[in-house]
Image (cartoon, helix red, strand yellow):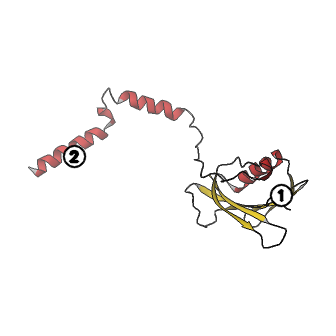
Amino acid sequence: MKKVVFMLLAAMMLAACDPKSATPATEPAAASRDRAAAEPAPAPRVAQGSPIPQPLAEGVRFSFPHHFRSQTVDSSIPGRTKLRITVEFLGDDVATVADTLIKDMKAAGFRVAKDETTPDARRMLLFRKDGFGPVQVQVAPRAGRPLKHRAASGTVYSVWPHAGQG
Protein backbone atom coordinates (compact mmCIF):
# COMPACT_ATOMS: atom_id res chain seq x y z
CA MET A 1 0.00 0.00 0.00
CA LYS A 2 2.82 2.42 0.88
CA LYS A 3 4.41 1.80 -2.52
CA VAL A 4 1.15 2.61 -4.32
CA VAL A 5 0.69 5.87 -2.41
CA PHE A 6 4.31 6.81 -3.04
CA MET A 7 3.98 6.06 -6.76
CA LEU A 8 0.79 8.14 -6.99
CA LEU A 9 2.43 11.09 -5.23
CA ALA A 10 5.51 10.85 -7.46
CA ALA A 11 3.33 10.74 -10.59
CA MET A 12 1.35 13.80 -9.43
CA MET A 13 4.56 15.74 -8.73
CA LEU A 14 5.96 14.90 -12.15
CA ALA A 15 2.70 15.90 -13.83
CA ALA A 16 2.77 19.23 -11.99
CA CYS A 17 6.29 19.93 -13.29
CA ASP A 18 5.50 18.98 -16.91
CA PRO A 19 4.91 22.18 -18.95
CA LYS A 20 2.86 20.21 -21.51
CA SER A 21 0.28 19.37 -18.86
CA ALA A 22 -0.41 23.01 -18.01
CA THR A 23 -4.07 23.69 -17.38
CA PRO A 24 -5.83 26.76 -18.77
CA ALA A 25 -5.78 28.27 -15.28
CA THR A 26 -1.95 28.25 -15.20
CA GLU A 27 -1.41 29.48 -18.76
CA PRO A 28 -2.48 33.11 -18.05
CA ALA A 29 -0.12 33.13 -15.06
CA ALA A 30 2.74 32.02 -17.31
CA ALA A 31 1.88 34.75 -19.84
CA SER A 32 1.77 37.28 -17.00
CA ARG A 33 5.26 36.19 -15.84
CA ASP A 34 6.57 36.60 -19.41
CA ARG A 35 5.17 40.15 -19.61
CA ALA A 36 6.61 40.99 -16.19
CA ALA A 37 10.02 39.68 -17.25
CA ALA A 38 9.96 41.90 -20.35
CA GLU A 39 9.24 45.05 -18.30
CA PRO A 40 12.17 46.74 -16.53
CA ALA A 41 12.19 46.04 -12.82
CA PRO A 42 11.92 49.05 -10.52
CA ALA A 43 15.09 50.02 -8.67
CA PRO A 44 15.37 48.19 -5.35
CA ARG A 45 14.23 50.33 -2.45
CA VAL A 46 16.33 50.24 0.71
CA ALA A 47 14.41 50.73 3.91
CA GLN A 48 15.39 53.75 5.98
CA GLY A 49 16.94 52.90 9.32
CA SER A 50 16.51 54.79 12.58
CA PRO A 51 16.74 58.57 12.10
CA ILE A 52 19.23 60.82 13.86
CA PRO A 53 17.45 61.75 17.13
CA GLN A 54 18.02 65.50 16.81
CA PRO A 55 18.45 67.85 13.85
CA LEU A 56 21.99 68.35 12.61
CA ALA A 57 23.58 71.78 12.93
CA GLU A 58 23.01 74.57 10.42
CA GLY A 59 20.05 72.82 8.80
CA VAL A 60 22.09 69.96 7.33
CA ARG A 61 20.03 66.89 6.38
CA PHE A 62 21.49 63.57 5.26
CA SER A 63 19.50 62.68 2.14
CA PHE A 64 21.09 59.25 1.63
CA PRO A 65 19.42 56.23 3.30
CA HIS A 66 21.01 55.81 6.72
CA HIS A 67 20.63 54.24 10.15
CA PHE A 68 21.58 56.16 13.30
CA ARG A 69 24.23 54.34 15.31
CA SER A 70 25.62 56.65 18.00
CA GLN A 71 26.12 60.16 19.23
CA THR A 72 28.64 61.36 21.81
CA VAL A 73 29.78 64.71 23.13
CA ASP A 74 33.54 65.18 23.43
CA SER A 75 34.55 67.97 25.83
CA SER A 76 38.12 66.78 26.39
CA ILE A 77 39.49 70.11 25.10
CA PRO A 78 38.14 73.05 27.13
CA GLY A 79 36.19 75.50 24.96
CA ARG A 80 36.13 73.10 21.99
CA THR A 81 33.24 70.76 22.63
CA LYS A 82 32.55 68.44 19.70
CA LEU A 83 29.53 66.36 18.80
CA ARG A 84 30.41 63.01 17.20
CA ILE A 85 27.64 61.37 15.18
CA THR A 86 27.90 57.95 13.55
CA VAL A 87 25.40 56.65 11.01
CA GLU A 88 25.50 53.57 8.81
CA PHE A 89 24.69 54.18 5.16
CA LEU A 90 22.31 51.73 3.55
CA GLY A 91 22.60 50.17 0.12
CA ASP A 92 25.05 52.60 -1.52
CA ASP A 93 28.80 52.73 -2.00
CA VAL A 94 31.33 55.13 -0.47
CA ALA A 95 31.60 57.36 -3.57
CA THR A 96 27.82 57.77 -3.94
CA VAL A 97 27.32 58.55 -0.25
CA ALA A 98 30.25 61.01 -0.16
CA ASP A 99 28.98 62.82 -3.27
CA THR A 100 25.46 63.00 -1.82
CA LEU A 101 26.86 64.26 1.48
CA ILE A 102 28.79 67.00 -0.33
CA LYS A 103 25.54 68.14 -2.01
CA ASP A 104 23.73 68.05 1.35
CA MET A 105 26.43 70.17 3.01
CA LYS A 106 26.57 72.65 0.11
CA ALA A 107 22.78 73.03 0.29
CA ALA A 108 23.26 74.18 3.91
CA GLY A 109 25.92 76.74 2.93
CA PHE A 110 29.09 74.72 3.59
CA ARG A 111 32.01 74.48 1.19
CA VAL A 112 34.39 71.56 0.73
CA ALA A 113 37.79 72.40 2.22
CA LYS A 114 39.23 68.90 1.79
CA ASP A 115 38.23 65.76 -0.11
CA GLU A 116 40.69 62.86 -0.09
CA THR A 117 40.38 59.14 -0.76
CA THR A 118 42.62 56.91 1.33
CA PRO A 119 44.29 53.70 0.08
CA ASP A 120 41.67 51.67 1.98
CA ALA A 121 38.82 53.41 0.06
CA ARG A 122 37.66 55.80 2.78
CA ARG A 123 36.67 59.36 1.83
CA MET A 124 37.95 62.00 4.22
CA LEU A 125 36.00 65.26 3.95
CA LEU A 126 36.34 68.62 5.67
CA PHE A 127 33.64 71.27 5.39
CA ARG A 128 33.75 74.93 6.35
CA LYS A 129 31.16 77.65 6.70
CA ASP A 130 31.66 81.24 7.79
CA GLY A 131 30.69 81.68 11.43
CA PHE A 132 30.70 77.93 12.11
CA GLY A 133 33.55 75.64 13.05
CA PRO A 134 34.91 72.92 10.77
CA VAL A 135 32.94 69.72 10.20
CA GLN A 136 35.04 66.60 9.69
CA VAL A 137 33.51 63.57 7.96
CA GLN A 138 34.82 60.10 7.16
CA VAL A 139 32.82 57.85 4.83
CA ALA A 140 34.09 54.29 5.24
CA PRO A 141 33.15 51.01 3.54
CA ARG A 142 32.03 48.03 5.59
CA ALA A 143 35.44 46.34 5.15
CA GLY A 144 34.60 43.39 7.38
CA ARG A 145 33.49 45.50 10.33
CA PRO A 146 30.27 44.42 12.05
CA LEU A 147 27.43 46.86 11.40
CA LYS A 148 24.06 47.05 13.15
CA HIS A 149 21.63 47.45 10.24
CA ARG A 150 21.24 44.45 7.92
CA ALA A 151 21.34 46.67 4.78
CA ALA A 152 24.35 48.73 5.92
CA SER A 153 27.16 49.10 3.39
CA GLY A 154 29.43 51.29 5.47
CA THR A 155 29.67 54.07 8.03
CA VAL A 156 29.69 57.87 8.11
CA TYR A 157 31.57 59.32 11.09
CA SER A 158 31.10 63.06 11.56
CA VAL A 159 32.51 65.55 14.05
CA TRP A 160 30.62 68.83 14.53
CA PRO A 161 31.25 71.88 16.69
CA HIS A 162 28.80 71.50 19.58
CA ALA A 163 26.43 74.29 20.65
CA GLY A 164 27.88 76.69 18.07
CA GLN A 165 31.42 76.36 19.38
CA GLY A 166 34.24 76.00 16.87
The image's mark for residue 10 is: 2
**In front of the other: 131 or 24:** 131
Where is the C terminus found, in terms of image quarters? bottom right
Position of residue 84 in the picture relative to residue 151 (left or right): right
**Residue 17 disc label:** none
Q: Residue at 62% across / 57% down in the picture?
A: 153
Q: Residue at x 73, y 63 (%)?
A: 84
How crowded pointer 2 is (Cα within 10 Å; few <14, some 14-19, many 20+) is rated as few
Distance from Cα at disc 1 to Cα at disc 2: 74 Å
For discs 1 and 2, the disc positioned in front in the rendered view: 1
Q: Is residue 149 visible?
A: yes
Seen in the image, is 59 located left or right of residue 42?
right
At x 70% / y 65%, what residue is drawn?
A: 72
Pinpoint residue 125: horizontal percent, then vertical percent.
80, 59
Quadrant in which residue 123 is drawn: bottom right
Q: Amino acid at mark 2?
A: Ala
The residue closer to the viewer here, 165 or 12, is 165
107 is higher (above) or lower (below) than 152: above
Residue 6 image position (x, y, % from top left): 17, 49
Whether residue 115 is visible here, answered yes or no, is: no
Q: Earlier in the sequence, mark 1 or mark 2?
A: 2
Residue 68 image point, x, y percent: 64, 56
Other residues around mark 1 within 10 Å, as few (<14) / some (14–19) / many (≥20): some
Q: Which image quadrant is residue 159 in?
A: bottom right
> Going 61% across and 67% down the picture, which residue do you hit?
145
The amino acid type, in three-letter code, at marker 1 is Gly
Q: Position of residue 60 (x, y in %)?
A: 77, 49
Element type where label 2 sits in the image: helix
**Please, what secondary structure does the residue beneath circle 1 have?**
loop
Single out the residue that lies furthest toward the right.
Answer: 130
Residue found at the far left of this picture: 1
* Residue designated by label 1: 164
